[in-house]
Amino acid sequence: MQQALVRSEERLKPLDVVAGFKIRPGFYSLNGAVAMPNAVSFTIHSHHATSVELCLFKRKEMVPYAVIPFPAAYRIGKVFSMMVFDLNIEEFEYAYRIYGPNEPEKGLIFDKNKYILDPYARAVVGQSTWGKPTGNNDFFKARVVRNTFEWGRAKQPLIPMEDLIIYELHVRAFTRADSSGVEFPGTYAGVKEKIPYLKELGINCVELMPVFEFDETNNSREIDGNMLYECWGYNTTSFFAPNTCYSSSLEFNREGNELKDLIKSLNEEGIEVILDVVFNHTGEGNENGPFYSFKGVDNNIYYLLTPDGHYYNFSGCGNTLNCNNPIVQDMILECLRYWVVNYRVDGFRFDLASILGRNEDGSPMNQPPILQSLAFDPILGDTKLIAEAWDAGGLYQVGSFPSWNRWAEWNGRYRDDLRSFLKGDDGKAQAAALRLTGSGDLYPPEIRGRNASVNFLDCHDGFTLYDLYSYNRKHNEVNGWNNTDGDNNNYSWNCGFEGETDDPEVMKLRWRMIRNACVALMCSRGTPMFFAGDEFGNTQFGNNNAYCQDNIISWVDWSLKEKNANLYEFFKHMIHFRQEHEVIRRDTGCCSLGFPPVSTHGVEPWQKEFDWESKLIGVMFAGRTRDKKKDDIVYAAINAYWEPQCVTLPELNGGLNWHYEVDTYASSQIVSHQDKAMTGRTIMIGPRTAVVLTAR
């Protein structure tokens, strides 16, 4: 559509001359800057602005070489649009100056002396070198881009939600360490170099931590000689622009080609791409934060404000986006459509998504318009929508997030209940059984379908899986907050020694606990997700809030893949095992033995209720193979007790016998398919051990 509009407008002639530039009214319905062969259309809207000026800068200059006021006649409603002729997009950058009332008690803080970043900018200037501040000036500029990427006949994988195995990673941290061995460390290209590794591991979806433009130098500081940056990327500068620091080469007037190439390459290998997006707040913070975009466009529209004009802080980061205001709704919808259409993104994970369900007074809404719009938007119709169903203001909606049978959720209850059960806490068996079988108490299939739960035991926020069994408490002293930051409720266990140790018995137990966690994750109904490096024991040395650590604390240490090869092979085996057995992921039809699709078991079979002292859970998945020619039955049991337990298995007939697939207590860890069938129905499961059996 845009290309057609551009072609139809190519013959348009200038109407006016302002500040020495030929101009005419632009494309009012196309937000941002739109490049044409001989002109650029600049469009911005502001509900309260009285006038707007377009400021043009020579590349890398901080003082404009031209200031072009939008003529009064070039305003329709609240939209200012102007087409400027004879501009070479290779030669300039742009920002706005916006005039309007300054009445802070009403949330109006227009400042004609500040340069304002276009909220719809497709590329932001000034942050192309990691860790290098933009300078003393507290503003960003945008550049006009031209889409030159050729998608050809590329198709998205469109993998069903229940078949995904999600691998969360940070673009920079994933390959920044020298041990990654890539040519372009810490970049989109570096991730692309690791695609063969991702294929070998067996995952089919990567979830990229924020790749929208952000300023990692915001709040940067030096602690004990180390520079700390806001390196996770959760303080967004611009929602439409990819982070240029993650590019291996400068892309001045190309629309994120390196990121597009990464997504296309992953899709070609059958790997989907989910973006972690942050629509709950921006990097502008509160009254003491920077002022570079939304504050200067329409502060009291884009942000949730108290009656006296201060910022609500349900994000914990200083401000909260006013997501259910129609203006902000439109921006979010346009943004997500843009990433789906222009970057072929397969899904989005929404950080602190409960904020998207808050009204303008901060109260929760029953049917938030923005969440409903996203659920039913045609462009997003095949796009995964995943909510982090809580916020920093205390709104916790795991299991109750408004979904329209469309939204999935990070299942925080899965994380907490399984962590507690796996380390042997009392009273957790019943909850753990629910989590392993799909969390039907939270997501009734008749209401939420069977694809609502994203199961995880760890993620970027908190301990790595290795640290979960190496530390009883967080060790965030290097963050500079006297260890007060980060969550105190980790449900972790150090296996008898805090931190690194050479004690062989402690380490043997730690590796077994990690393998147990892997078994639980890969043998649960719902979509599994784990954090990059878990598969070979990556550590953050006890730091459970590594948001500011751009160093080996947060970087993936690839040397551990060889050092901990047994763990890597175990993860790889369990991933492939899950993919081979569809019955774990969904109902596949009745098996000949009449077993239900999912059932729970204890030391005796067919146990549905577990008492306070229970420390063993078995879960059985039963159905037909993909070709429907034979039964497919998987039984997984986890003994969280510190002593062995004798377990009676469900009875088989029809010539079937139970066979070991995995025993985390055994030195071999993975049991060969050629092993002989079990005799009898009774097995001894070792202390703090998981086993996986199949019937054949």
Image: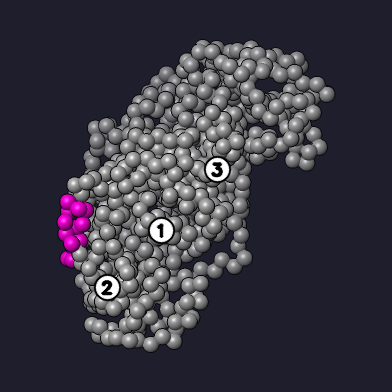
The reply to whether residue 35 is visible in this rendering is yes
Q: x and y percent of residue 177 in the render?
A: 42, 47
Dot 2 lies on which element?
strand
Q: Amino acid at mark 1?
A: Asp
Residue drawn at point x = 54 percent, y = 20 percent: 430
Q: Which residues are magenta?
A: 101-113
Quadrant hosting residue 464:
top left
Residue drawn at point x = 24 percent, y = 65 percent: 49
The disc at residue 405 is 3
Cα–Cα span, label 3 and label 1: 22 Å
Q: x and y percent of residue 83 in the render?
A: 35, 78
Q: Is mark 3 in CB contact (under 8 Å) with mark 1?
A: no
Residue drawn at point x = 68 percent, y = 14 percent: 648
For the residues carrying marks 2 and 1, which lies nearer the camera in this image? 1
Answer with left or right where residue 425 lies relative to residue 321: right
Dot 3 lies on which element?
loop
Q: x and y percent of residue 201 in the render?
A: 58, 43
Q: Earlier in the sequence, mark 3 or mark 1?
A: 1
For the residues carrying marks 2 and 3, which lies nearer the camera in this image? 3
Badge 1 is on which residue? 330
The disc at residue 54 is 2
